[in-house]
Amino acid sequence: MAIPINMENRTFIVLIEQDEDGIYVAKVPDLQGCYTQGKSIEQAMERVKEAIQVCLESEKEAFLPLKFVGIQQLEVKANA
């Protein structure tokens, strides 16, 4: 079921990863291209709130939220 863009309060899943330089990258899977970064998790979370607002303002149509199932880490052996 599509959620209209003009709803007031929404909950989003935010994925947080840390890059090789120690910077935290926050991504919102429900909103294509919605991500930001910060020097701390707290800074990344504050910035991702702003990024979500910008992404929602630029959306022209309703979005289809994803259902969070879980996170898995998978190691794949590189071909030598």
Image (cartoon, rainbow, N blue to C red):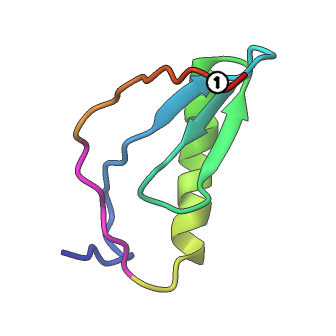
Q: Is residue 42 magenta?
A: no
* Above or below, comparing residue 3 to residue 23 in the picture: below
- The residue furthest front is 80
> x, y percentage for residue 76?
52, 24
Residue in the picture at 18% in, 75% down: 1
The quadrant holding residue 44 is top right
The quadrant holding residue 55 is bottom right
Residue in the picture at 34% in, 29% down: 71
Dot 1 surroundings within 10 Å: few (below 14), some, or many (20 or more)? few
Secondary structure that dominates the magenta span: loop
Q: Is residue 64 magenta?
A: yes
The quarter in which the C terminus is drawn is: top right
Q: Nearer the viewer, residue 66 or 61?
A: 66
Residue in the picture at 49% in, 48% down: 28
Looking at the picture, which amino acid does disc 1 mark? Ala
Region of the chain picked out in magenta, as a range: 62-68
* Image-based side of 38 in relation to 68, left or right: right
* Above or below, comparing residue 79 to residue 61 in the picture: above
Q: Nearer the viewer, residue 45 or 1?
A: 1
> x, y percentage for residue 56?
51, 68
> x, y percentage for residue 51?
61, 52
Q: Which residue is mark 1?
A: 78
Q: Nearer the viewer, residue 73 or 47?
A: 73
